[in-house]
Image: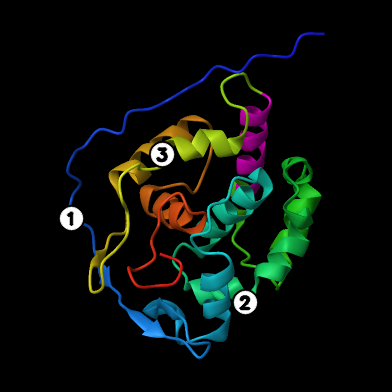
Amino acid sequence: MSRKRKRQVTINVEEKKLKEPEKTQYTVVKSSSGRWICSWAEDSPMKKAYHDEIWGTPTHDDQILFEMLVLSGFQAGLSWLTILKKMENFRNAFAQWNIQRVAEFDATDREKLLQNRGIIRNRMKIDAAISNANAILAIQNGSEFESFSQCIWRFSRKSSQKRKIGCASPTKTVEAELMSKDLKKRGFRFVGPTICYAFMQMVGIVNGHIEGCWKS
């Protein structure tokens, strides 16, 4: 039986100017462990652990990518610390982020999620998580890409991405705009450019660490 051949797909990220977004300036600080880290992670042990262990680490596992994309959507309008405190609850509520199982969630499962005080009980975001699981399955089972990872890593910028101390951090980029447009066409929800850019930094598609941070 012949194996289905996947078609290689590439994109050209065109250079164009975006409207100037709001920006935040960060620096690096020396942590209690003696390492220099991005200043935003210094005020909370939970944020520091997230910074050191997860944020910005290049990730190609579809299940982890699904988790981070969904959590980026749930974080919209909230502090990231709120999501960090609920990460284990989210994992348990969403079948350990098993894409196939989440795609099969029905009305009863949705209602259970809406009653779950351990997560963010937002119907639109819950529905988006289930829709996004189905969209990922469509990519995995299609002929265009080998995986969801291959689909989204097309938007990685090849040039240097290190941020200098005191630099302004954008809320979106050209690549995030293109990813957002592409994912929406594929049926994804809660994937606006700002959410996509946050997601890209989380999974290492963009290196958001400040120059001087031990992970930069």
In-image side of 195 versus 4 (left or right): left
Compare marks 3 and 1 and give the one earlier in the sequence: 1
In-image side of 67 versus 187 (left or right): right
Q: Which residues are magenta?
A: 129-141
* Marks 2 and 3 in Cβ contact (< 8 Å): no
Q: Quadrant of the N terminus?
A: top right
Q: Nearer the viewer, residue 189 or 61?
A: 61
Helix, strand or loop: magenta stretch: helix
The image position of residue 165, as x and y in percent, is: 26, 73
According to the picture, the residue beneath numbered tag 3 turns out to be 155
Q: Vertical placement of 51 versus 91: above or below?
A: below
| Residue farthest toward the top in the current orientation of the protein | 1
Q: Is residue 170 magenta?
A: no
- Which of discs 3 and 1 lies nearer the camera? The answer is 3
Compare marks 2 and 3 and give the one earlier in the sequence: 2
The image position of residue 46, as x and y in percent, is: 58, 80
* Image disc number at residue 77: none
Q: How is colour applied across the structure in the image?
A: rainbow
Disc 2 marks a residue whose amino acid type is Lys
Disc 3 marks a residue whose amino acid type is Phe
* Residue at left offset 38%, top offset 80%: 39
Q: Nearer the viewer, residue 116 or 22?
A: 22
* Image disc number at residue 85: 2
The image position of residue 73, as x and y in percent, is: 52, 56
In-image side of 122 versus 19 (left or right): right
Q: Nearer the viewer, residue 108 or 146?
A: 146
Q: Is residue 138 magenta?
A: yes
According to the picture, the residue beneath numbered tag 1 turns out to be 20
Q: Which structural element holds mark 1?
A: loop
